[in-house]
Amino acid sequence: MGIQPVNFHSVEDFLSFIPDQEREIVERLRQVVFDCIPQVREKLAYNVPFYYGRRRICFIWPASVPWGAVPLNGVQLGFCSGHLMRDELNWLEHGNRKQVYIKTFKKVDEIDTEMVRAYLFEAVRVDDDK
């Protein structure tokens, strides 16, 4: 078996697989992404939804879709070029990563829609500048 024990053929397959609590978070984040970036393209990569403009802008990764040996917790909203984004509030989690920065949500009520929107707009700015 490869690095992931799942293989989804569509976003619908992905959504039907994840637990209800994660699905609620994922669906809220997806809605904010589509509201902020109407021209965005959604495509599965690594069995999770990635969102594309000129390049990869962001992704939504729930813990129930494993990657590697490190267990995840919650649902990650990842910014593919997070290292180029302005983050004066230190809202994003850098961890040991050099490029991709994330924000983790464990409950849907942790999602601050205005903050997510602001960071999505910043991610689009970075994508447009590439």
Image (spheres, helix red, strand yellow):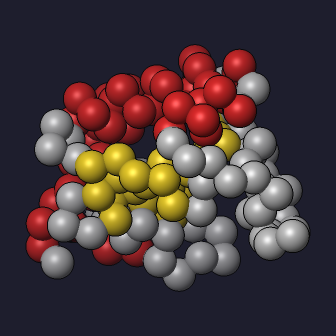
Can residue 115 be seen from the camera position used here?
no
Q: Residue at x 40, y 52 (%)?
A: 43
Quarter-of-image position of residue 95? bottom right
**Residue furthest out toward the bottom:** 98
Task: Relative to 56, say whether 71 is above or below.
Answer: above
Q: Residue at x 71, y 21 (%)?
A: 21
Quadrant in which the C terminus appears:
bottom left
Return the residue nearer the eye: 115 or 80: 80
Position of residue 10 measured from the top left corner of the image (x, y, whole percent) = 51, 42
Position of residue 41 measured from the top left corner of the image (x, y, whole percent) = 27, 49
In the image, 21: left or right of 40?
Answer: right
Q: Residue at x 15, y 44 (%)?
A: 39
Task: Relative to 116, say whether 7 is above or below.
Answer: below
In the image, 94: left or right of 33?
Answer: right
Position of residue 111 measured from the top left corner of the image (x, y, whole percent) = 51, 27
Quadrant in which the N terminus appears:
bottom right
Task: Relative to 13, say whether 102 is above or below.
Answer: below
